[in-house]
Image (spheres, rainbow, N blue to C red):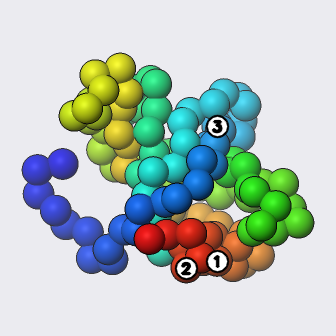
Amino acid sequence: MANERRIIKRRNFQYYMQMYDDQTEELLGHLVDVSQKGFKMDSKKQIPAGRDYRLRMDLIGEISGRPFIVFTARSKWCQTDPMDPFIFNVGFEITGMNQADAAIYKQIVEKYGS
């Protein structure tokens, strides 16, 4: 990501939370850092920029009694991890989330971001 255009600063994520394609149930990766409007995920597969996904984020018990939240997000960029050439860093912008899931996501950003 050569030009930094992010307005809201991301926060490093301190827990291993898996992200799935909710339609195919394929594991896409896990969270690396979060912001109010999006997140970065590490993935074993290259994810093309500009694609919309319906994602499921598995939650840990400390966050909610619910096992997961579901929302839509658009992949914004994808690049090879500088430390591991077999991992891709992928940036996503959240494009749709219901109010209850948005409250849980906000709690994740506030409580577990560093």
Query: Which quadrant is the C terminus positioned in?
Result: bottom left
Q: Which residue is mark 1?
A: 107
Name the residue at 75% across, 68% down. 63
Query: Residue 40, how many percent across, how many down?
Result: 41, 52
**Residue plotted at (48% across, 74% down):** 36
Residue at the image position 67 percent from the left and 51 percent from the top: 57
Q: Amino acid at mark 1?
A: Gln
Of residues 77 and 31, the one drawn nearer to the viewer in this rendering: 31
Compare residues 69 and 74 and report the one nearer the observer. 69
Using residue 69 as the reference point, say whether residue 20 is left or right of it: left
Q: Which residue bears the numbered disc 3?
A: 21
Q: Residues within 10 Å of mark 1 (few under 14, many from 20)?
A: some
Separation of marks 1 and 2 at Cα, in angstroms: 5 Å
Structural distance between the alpha carbons of marks 2 and 3: 24 Å
Q: Horizontal placement of 44 versus 65: left or right?
A: left
User: Is any part of residue 102 visible from this angle?
Assistant: no
Q: Secondary structure at mark 2?
A: helix
Q: Label 2 belongs to which residue? A: 110
Q: Front-most of 70 and 113?
A: 113
Q: Residue furthest top?
A: 86
Asked whether the residues under the numbered discs 2 and 3 touch, taking CB atoms below 8 Å apart as contact, a structural biologist would say no
